[in-house]
Amino acid sequence: MGLRQIAIGSILAVAAAAHALVPRQNVNPGAVSGDTFIHDPTVVKTPSGSYIAAFTANGVGLKTSTDRTRWTDAGAAFPNGAPWTTTYTKGDKNLWAPDISYHNGKYYMYYSASSFGASRSAIFLATSTTGASGSWTNEGLIIESFDNSDWNAIDPNLIVDAQGKWWLSFGSFWSGLKMIPLVANTGKRSGTDLISIASRTENGRAIEAPYITRNGNYYYLWASFDRCCQGAASTYRIMVGRSTSVTGPYVDKSGKQMMQGGGTQMMSSHGSIHGPGHNAVFTDTDGDVLVYHYYKDDGTAQLGINLIRYDNGWPVIY
């Protein structure tokens, strides 16, 4: 083989290796219909095969679907309000970033009470046997942060690890994303451990919305970088890292730790899809399902749904 062929072969090999490090990004959302306005979505599949979505709204908003495509408004989890949260919301009824899952014959929902830009926040737990509006029982405060805290008690997510242990990840901005152990089955806090799992110094430390999933030998920490809640001007983007331990360290595809600002980008603004982020993941019969919000050109928040496959141990959105 001549020197020219060797050089070309080397260039192609380097290009192929570089391409392998780049995940497929910016796939358009799958088809959804009906009531598709949503912000900070989380979805659970019910034992009957239908779906419940919970999202940021007054009293925590709910939607339902029979086919994961057409969605119907289902009222609020707390239609009569949640007065136990107003200390943290400055009187606002809007409750943020719920996390819904199903265990032991009932639904568990963690949700946040805060006000924009404040670190005085709290995460609460509610349970229900049906998931329907008005059926939720307040199980009390799980963790709170204060004005002088360097972390923020919002954006909760429950993960049950391979050993059956329960953990709650959460956090936004400041010193980054945290994790605490929970008592299995009750979902209440266990002990005083506060574990750091991701942090960022760039762009005003803009990292939030952790969501941890498990596939094979890896745990995946999904998170959102940059700015939410600015309509079509939002710069939110979905990032991921992985670890063989639920508590980390999580690293991105290049090997950079998420505690040092690492994260492999999975989706960002493209075309008429603005600021995709605050994602959740659940497993369905056809694989893992990614749900998130994005903004349309007119600034309206919309539900995005895609599927996830895994390539050499890394998620690929399609």
Image (spheres, grey):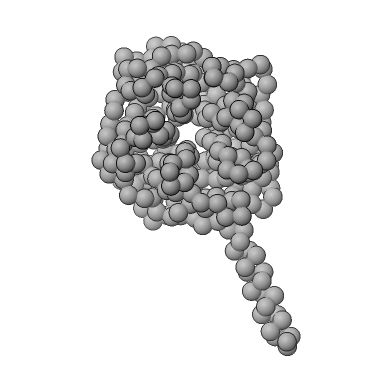
Q: Can residue 283 be seen by looking at this rendering? A: yes
The relative height of residue 267 versus residue 48 in the rendered view (above or below) is below
Taking the image as shown, residue 50 lies to the left or right of residue 252, namely left
Residue at the (38%, 50%) spot, across then down = 29
Say above or below: 81 vs 19: above
Q: How many marks?
A: 0
Residue at the image point whose x is 32% and y is 32% from the top = 63
Q: Quadrant of residue 23?
A: bottom right
Of 89 and 162, the residue lying toward us: 162
Is any part of residue 261 visible from this angle? no
Residue furthest bottom as drawn: 2
* Quadrant of the rendered image containing residue 53: top left
Q: Position of residue 115 (x, y in %)?
A: 45, 23
Which is more toward the observer, 133 or 236?
Answer: 133
Q: Residue at x 44, y 18 (%)?
A: 126
Quadrant the C terminus occupies: bottom left
Q: Is residue 302 above or below residue 267?
A: above
Q: Quadrant of residue 48?
A: top left
Is 247 left, or right, of 157 in this rendering? right
Return the x and y of residue 289 as percentages of the image width and height. Answer: 45, 44
